[in-house]
Amino acid sequence: MGKYKVLTDEQVGSFLDKGYLVVNDCLDMRVANGWIDEAYQRLGYRKDDPGTWVKDIVWMDHKNRMPVRQIAPRAWDAILDVVGGEDRLEQQVMEIKPSGHFTSINSFMWSDAFVVNFHRGADQPWQPPSPRVGGWHKDGSYFRHFLDSREQALLTVVLWSDMLHQGGATFIAPDSVRVVARYLYEHPEGVAPHDFKFQELISQCTQFEEITGKAGDFVILHPFMLHASSQNVLRRPRFMSNPPIVLKEPMNFNRENPENFSLLERATLHYLGLQRLDFKPVAQRASYWEPAATPA
């Protein structure tokens, strides 16, 4: 696999077979721990006092930002390995803030826009990943989804803290990548975010996993991966984020030279059982970046 800078054969195989790969020990933990300490201050919570953790889960806006190549150089190289190089990435993208408003951010940056699960669902018995768990979805509420869409090129998970079993880890369905790929292939007119029938899609899946790992780990998932949040019955705060990865152009499944297929494009074709595909949308692409109304 000489074409990849940091990915091993095992990681490439995992992305092709299971729809995701893991890169360990990516983060500069001095920065990460500093941002986490500051996050507690921003929330008005005390790190050593669970009684102050009022909300069970919090979606934070960012205060600090840093280039990915600086805070997590191995993660950055892995992203480029999957998408086919820096020249295929869009730098300026849009971000949904917790307030519901939109703001322009740089997709080459990571920030402290943490999703913090303090104790969500801790008052209920633990439920392992299965179709019965609610909330299964595919990311991308801001565009019409096509097989080749560029707007959510990768689903990423940054572990700023340990992500433990029964501690708020993300649930995934590895075989959902194949299910969603086929679904989008059969809908060249595209699918609006609210038109996905996620319960029907997840009911076709039989493989379910709980992503766990150590602080500093980074997970790259195929954008078609259905996933869901889980309970944190351990009541040990879990800090993670899902930085956006956006392509300049839609994926190309019909490149003249197959060597120029990105790993992402190869994987998508693989899940469809195809060598190449001259995919052309039969409806216009649509973006839903309209600013939210100001709350009263």
Image (cartoon, rainbow, N blue to C red):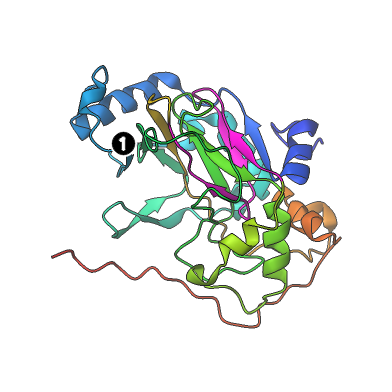
In terms of secondary structure, what is the magenta stretch mainly?
loop
Q: In which quarter of the image is residue 109?
A: top left
Residue type at the position of mark 1: Asn
Q: Which residue is drawn at 26% across and 23% down?
A: 50
Q: In the image, residue 132 lies at what x, y percent?
A: 56, 50
Residue 179: image quadrant is bottom right
Query: Picture coordinates of residue 296 (x, y %)?
Result: 13, 65
Quarter the N terminus occupies:
top right
Question: Total label count?
Answer: 1
Q: Can residue 107 be seen in this view?
A: yes
Residue position marked by numbered label 1 in the rendering: 64
> Which residue is at a point 70% across and 34% down the rendered structure image?
5
Provide residue 140's location: percent of width, then percent of height.
50, 60
Which of the pair 72/296 is nearer the observer?
296
| Highlighted range, magenta | 207-232
Q: Residue 135: where, in percent of width, then height?
A: 49, 52
244 sits left or right of 36 in the view? right
Which residue is at the far left?
A: 296
Horizontal side of residue 113 vs 185, given as left or right: left
Above or below: residue 165 compared with residue 201: above
Q: Can residue 261 be seen in this snapshot?
A: no
Kind of element beneath mark 1: loop
Q: Residue sitting at 77 percent across and 53 percent down? A: 266
Q: Residues within 10 Å of mark 1 (few under 14, many from 20)?
A: few
- Residue 228 to residue 197: above or below: above
Q: In the rendered view, would you say 180 is above or below 118?
A: below
Q: Which residue is drawn at 73% across and 65% down?
A: 182
- Compared to 145, does 83 lie above or below? above
Q: Is residue 223 magenta?
A: yes
The residue nearer to you, when weighing 132 against 8, is: 132
